[in-house]
């Protein structure tokens, strides 16, 4: 059997084709059934490279893939792959499959946004609502960026660090307010500022800022599961780029970090191919 696995967000979709003789990876633009109708999804699917779709099992994990939107995604895939077996699940369950496999654990997403869940080895049994970058999303790229510019514009960081931010990014106060409040996708703009933190992560102000924000992710999300006995594992660019600060925050909050994957699709592939082999 050939497996086609998708890990989809609003910006891009990563695909992996697992065939008996090897694997191929490719990307398309992002698909989110909460945002995209079936015609728009079909247009994106038509950009996939050609391959043999006989005896195909499609596994689609994506943002926005919860009822009733997952039904839209399922119909679009079934129309495009009429003879395939198809499953559609949330990106959170995909992260849990990639990180935990068939073992109990706490799985988290820490990228532009953030999310977490308690996973029992088969399904998600608890999920603290992330609430998005204005009300929640602690530790995410968008919130790190939001708090970074707040500290710069309010002069909370040192004068030298504030000057470095303006010099390195080229954004004035007016520029930032315009991008956040008047232009679309302010969360992505704010997340794009996070590399500044990476360049200055050895400075005390930035180190403490990162650890404080990651501690907030643990205390306001992970702690609610009441399972300090379980490892806390992560997918996402923020988690993989700031591993040492994340681990320090975990220790201070009484948790231990398990696996960290920048891209979950390989872990998804391992889980799914093992699962289908056992099911057959």
Image: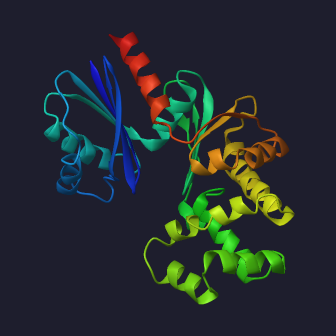
- In the image, taking residue 100 as reference, residue 72 lies left or right, namely left
Q: Can residue 65 be seen from the camera position used here?
A: no
Locate residue 126, reporting x and y percent.
57, 39
Is residue 130 toward the left or the right of residue 11 in the image?
Answer: right
- Residue at the extreme bottom: 174
Residue 9 visible, this orientation: yes
Q: Position of residue 248 (x, y in %)?
A: 81, 45
Which residue sits at x=71%, y=33%?
Answer: 227
Tell me if residue 122 comes above or below residue 215 in the rendering: above
Q: Which residue is drawn at 17% across and 35% down?
A: 81
Tell whether 56 sits left or right of 219. Answer: left
Answer with the quarter of the image where residue 254 lies: top right
At a point 44% along the width and 80% down the height, the residue shown is 183
Percent position of residue 67, x then y: 34, 46
Residue drawn at 79 percent across, 48 percent down: 249
- In the rendered view, would you say 246 is above or below 123? below
Q: In this view, does 35 lie to the left or right of 222?
A: left
């Amino acid at each position: 059997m050939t497996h086609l696995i998708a890990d989809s967000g609003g910006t891009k979709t990563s695909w992996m084709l697992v065939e008996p003789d090897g694997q191929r990876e490719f990307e398309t633009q992002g698909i989110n059934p909460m945002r995209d109708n079936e015609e728009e999804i079909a247009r994106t699917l038509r950009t996939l490279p050609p391959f043999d779709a006989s005896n195909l099992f499609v596994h689609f994990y994506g943002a926005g893939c919860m009822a009733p939107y997952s039904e839209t995604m399922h119909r679009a895939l079934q129309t495009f792959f009429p003879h395939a077996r198809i499953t559609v699940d949330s990106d959170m369950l995909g992260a849990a499959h990639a990180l935990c496999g068939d073992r109990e654990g706490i799985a988290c997403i820490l990228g532009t946004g953030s999310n977490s869940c308690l996973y029992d080895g088969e399904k998600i049994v608890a999920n603290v609502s992330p609430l998005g970058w204005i009300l929640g999303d602690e530790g995410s790229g968008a919130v790190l960026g939001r708090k970074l510019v707040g500290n710069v514009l309010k002069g909370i960081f040192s004068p030298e660090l504030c000057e470095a931010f303006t010099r390195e990014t080229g954004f004035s106060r007016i520029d930032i307010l315009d991008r956040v409040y008047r232009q679309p996708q302010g969360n992505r703009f704010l997340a794009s500022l996070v590399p500044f933190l990476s360049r200055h992560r050895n400075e005390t102000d930035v180190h403490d800022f990162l650890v404080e924000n990651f501690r907030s992710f643990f205390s306001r999300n992970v702690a609610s599961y009441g399972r300090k006995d379980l490892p806390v594992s992560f997918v996402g660019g923020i988690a993989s780029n700031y591993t040492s600060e994340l681990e320090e925050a975990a220790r201070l909050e009484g948790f231990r970090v398990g696996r960290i994957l920048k891209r979950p699709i390989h872990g998804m592939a391992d889980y799914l191919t093992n699962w289908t082999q056992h099911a057959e």
